[in-house]
Structure formats: C-alpha cells, structure tokens
Amino acid sequence: MVGEDKLPRCSWGTSTPELQRYHDQEWGRPVGDDDRVFEKLCLEGFQSGLSWLTILRKRAGFRRAFGSFDPTVIAGFSDADVDRLLADTGIVRNRAKIRATITNAQATIGLRERGISLAALLWEHEPDTARPPTSMSVLPGSTPESQALSAELRNHGFRFVGPTTVYAAMQSLGVVNDHLVGCHFRDIVQSIRTEFTVPR
C-alpha cells in the first residue's frame, strides 16, 4: 500500500502513525543484543490475544515497569513487584504474563550461566532460504523453525513462547525478512541483514 509519502509499504504499516514508524524503523531489522531479544519475546508474550498496537503504545510503560527489560533486574522480582505491576495502568495487567516475564528472565540468566546467548539461540533457527512473500495472505503463522525454537525455549524454562509468538519475534528481530515484495523497506532490511554479524 502506498502511503502519504508515496512510498509503498506492507499494508499493516500504513494503518497508524505508530505502526508506520515501527514498520519503517524497526520491524525486520536484525537484532543481536540479548536484552533486546529478551524484551521482544516478553512483549510478544504480552501481545497474545491483543493487538500489537496496544503493546506498542504501552511499550514505554513496560520498559519503565520492568527495569528496561534487564533480565538481571527482573529475575529478582518478588511477589510485591507482581502486585506493583498488577496495579500499573501503563502496562497490560495480566498476572500469568507478568509471572512468565519473571520466569523468562530467570531462564535467560540460566542460559548465560551455561555460556549460552539468548540472541545466539534465536539466530540458530534462521531458515536457510525463504521465498519473498508477495501478500499478507501467504505469511505463515508459524514455521518449522519457530516450532523448533519454541520447543527449545520451553526446554530451557521459558513460558508464553508458543510457535506463533516466537515467529512474530523472529519477524520483528530480523531472523526472517517478511516485508512484502514491492515494499520500499524490504530491500533496505535485506541490505542491513547482509551486513549483520550473526551472534554465536
């Protein structure tokens, strides 16, 4: 879909100013930082059953409430912190998702203690090849790679990381480039991915 600036974009990226900025500046650009990968997995978990726009509009509140998504901070959250978060209108107040975020922080620390990078674990599941999508209708909800990553994360103690949630994170974090053929930003993202050093 062509936006007001005459640039063609994936249709979802033209629906609101927030989504357009996210589409243009973040979505699909490769990320290799552990804390940013952790944040994305957590936010995608919170998004389950909701729209991404809801999460995007509350992202600053989430970052404030969850210590900038530093796993070492969140891993030490207590029951009092859970109560604090349940009273925070700046986030999605869901007890199960809040506790899953704490559990996932602890699991991330557990990986680090074994010398495993969460970002590297994510990128191990980059598909070998991918056919450029021509329409939103051909984009999968999950893939064999996201199913495998979901299973591995669960084995490491992560929660709210089903294959669909994980695939959404893979799309956002640039593990796949799902900008549609014809989208102005597809080639930009692909160029960035070519120069990206995959974490190991």
Image (spheres, helix red, strand yellow):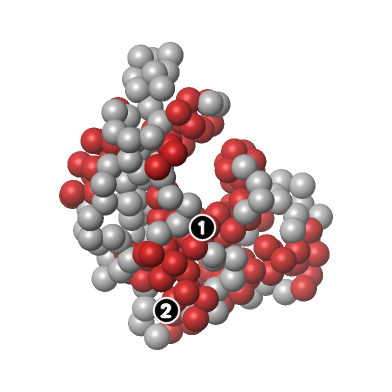
Badge 2 crowding class, 10 Å Cα cut-off, few under 14, some 14 to 19, many 20 or more, is few
Numbered circle sitting on residue 188: none
Q: CA distance from mark 2 to mark 1?
A: 25 Å
Element type at marker 1?
Answer: helix
Residue 8 location (% of width, % of height): 35, 22
Residue 188 location (% of width, % of height): 25, 36
Element type at marker 2?
Answer: helix
Q: Nearer the viewer, residue 183 or 39?
A: 183
Within the image, what quadrant is residue 192 found in? top left
Q: Which quarter shows the C terminus? A: bottom left
Q: Which residue: 39% across, 18% down?
A: 2
Q: Which quarter shows the N terminus? A: top left
Numbered circle sitting on residue 112: 2
- The residue pinned by badge 1 equals 164
Q: Seen in the image, is 40 located left or right of residue 1? A: right
Label 1 is placed on what type of residue? Thr
Asked if residue 54 is positioned above or below residue 153 in the image, the reply reads above
Judged from this view, the residue extending furthest toward the front is 138
Label 2 is placed on what type of residue? Arg
Residue 156 location (% of width, % of height): 49, 80
The answer to whether residue 36 is visible is no
Q: Which residue: 30% across, 61% down?
A: 126
Along the polypeptide, which appears first: circle 2 or circle 1? Answer: 2
Q: Which residue: 43% across, 14% down?
A: 4
Q: Nearer the viewer, residue 31 or 6?
A: 6
Asked if residue 157 is positioned above or below residue 150 in the image, the reply reads below
Residue 58 location (% of width, % of height): 64, 43
